[in-house]
Image (cartoon, rainbow, N blue to C red):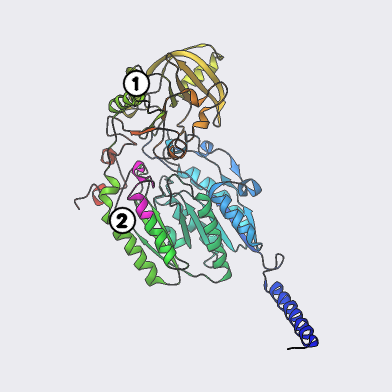
Amino acid sequence: MKSSFSKKHSIGNAIIILAIVSVCLVSCQPSAESSDFKVAVVRYSHETCTFCPGGDTEIEDWRGLAEGEDLLNSRGYIGGFVKRARNYGDISLIGVRSPGGVFGGSSRSWNSEESFDHFMGMILEDIKTNMPLDGVYLALHGAMAVRNVPRPEAEIAKRIREIVGSDVPIVGTFDLHGNEDKEFLQWADGAFVTKRFPHYDSYHQGERAAHYMRNMMLGTYKPAKATRKPGIISPTVVQWTGQSPAMDIMERARRWEARHADVFVSVFYGFPWSDVPDVGTTIHVMTNGDQQLADSIAEDMNEFTWRVRKEFVDRDYPMPDVAAARTVAAVRNGATPVVLGNYSDRPGDATWILKALLSKNLKNIIYSALRDEKVLDSLVNINAQVGDSFDFNVGGFTGPQAGTPIRLKGTIKYFGPRWGYDNVAAVELPGNNLVIVVPAYEQIIYPSQLTFDTINADDYDIFVVNSRVHFRRGFDETGYAKTIMVVDAPGPWIGTTRLDALDYQNVDLQSLYPYNDQ
């Protein structure tokens, strides 16, 4: 049995050792003053529908700029990146001047080369001003289309690389609807793509990008990269990751990430309404210096995606008259609320579904929303007020895909600002039917968006939303709607699954499934 002196001596030595270790640990940590990594944060994101009739997106169509803390306080990808980066304690962030969203979103057509050069000029100027940098984070989309710039996101990375040099990590985050190929990763060091549609994991991908970049800056990660293109083009409506095999493809990517440390696997399903050469499905893999592993994973993902191509792409949806008949049956059987996803209406002014529903004398419909900026201008010009009568032809003006205008006679239930627009109008029709008129394509995701002023979403049984998948967040996954249908349009137009009707100039559809012979 040890003496009390021996015990005290041992305890004293232990305390001394712990103190020495603590000092060493503190001294080995990066100093916030002397070892900070300086990282620029850039956002330049647009999902471009080159076939849409909205006209080219010019400089003035972008909604303002964000920089500094205004940019760094953004949500989604940037929110995740900033939170993780700041939690490390050794990264200082610079919010570079960045364009906001585009009025009309993805219903607008090509970005002009002038607007691209304008915003890139500002971004590059800020990057130069803040040199030297230790890293550059790019919050992108992947489906931007710019006239005379075949691969805009790769061009963004290229122009930044020419300034920061070869040793500064450049990492991007993307929407899974992006159109990419190997060129982005020739100029950048990493790409992180959402694995869920709806995009629940955009914040998470931002966090992953920050973790990855920091390891590169510390010198503990040296990326080996691999890219594959399975040769598949698909409309976004089939890309819902709540169903197989879209779900299975993403799960396979997650399995590879779980099986190997420091492996990152991303899948772009693509955005077919951008007439760009890298359209379609893309697979990106990054490993820590193991090129053989990166290539083997990319090959496996490529083979699996090709194997399930038919189940992935080939899907049918009811036409408006069939959907209206099924809605009648659902109401009769008490299977309400009914939500109809008007998936193909990218310009936002199509009248097919509304006409089909009203022809069945259905009640308690809320249609959100029908685009007609000219009608809204007319209401402004006559100083329209709530309670005034409404009698206008609405929608159906962007071409054959929109059908023809519908005559709406009713009463203005709401007229004023909503969803970031100066004015929207809610028109009450007989039978407690409500049509919301907006100045640009608007996608409703949650029923709560339709409760405002004197309007209450719970007063309606039938919802029509301009959405392919995102509406499932609020109407499907919450259990809100008892009946859910995705509804087609009666023609091979922009937005439908019939991509071979589109006049592609930069894409050979015959080289891609389902339009090739394989």
Q: Is residue 112 left or right of residue 511?
A: right
Image location of residue 346, percent across then percent down: 39, 34
Residue 508 visible in the picture: no
Tell me whether the residue at label 1 lies in contact with that at label 2, contact meaning CB atoms closer than 8 angstroms.
no
- Amino acid residing under circle 2: Thr
Where residue 464 sits, quadrant-wise, is: top left
How many numbered discs sit on the rendered protein? 2
Look at the image and say whether residue 408 sits in the magenta stretch: no
The residue drawn where x is 42% and y is 42% is: 48
Q: Which residues are magenta?
A: 234-250
Residue 355: which numbered mark, if any? 1
| Residue 106 or residue 25, whichever sits in front | 25
Q: Quadrant of residue 469?
A: top left
327 on left or right of 202: left
Task: Report x, y in % for residue 472.
Answer: 43, 39
Compared with 248, 370 (above or below) is above
Residue labelled with disc 2: 305
Q: Is residue 376 above or below residue 310?
A: above
Which SS class for mark 2? Answer: helix
Identify the amino acid type marked 1. Answer: Lys
Query: How much space separates mark 1 and mark 2, taking CA atoms?
Result: 39 Å
At mark 1, the secondary structure is helix
**Looking at the image, is mark 1 or mark 2 earlier in the sequence?**
2
The residue shown at (29%, 41%) is 499
Instruction: Residue 503: give its label.
Output: none
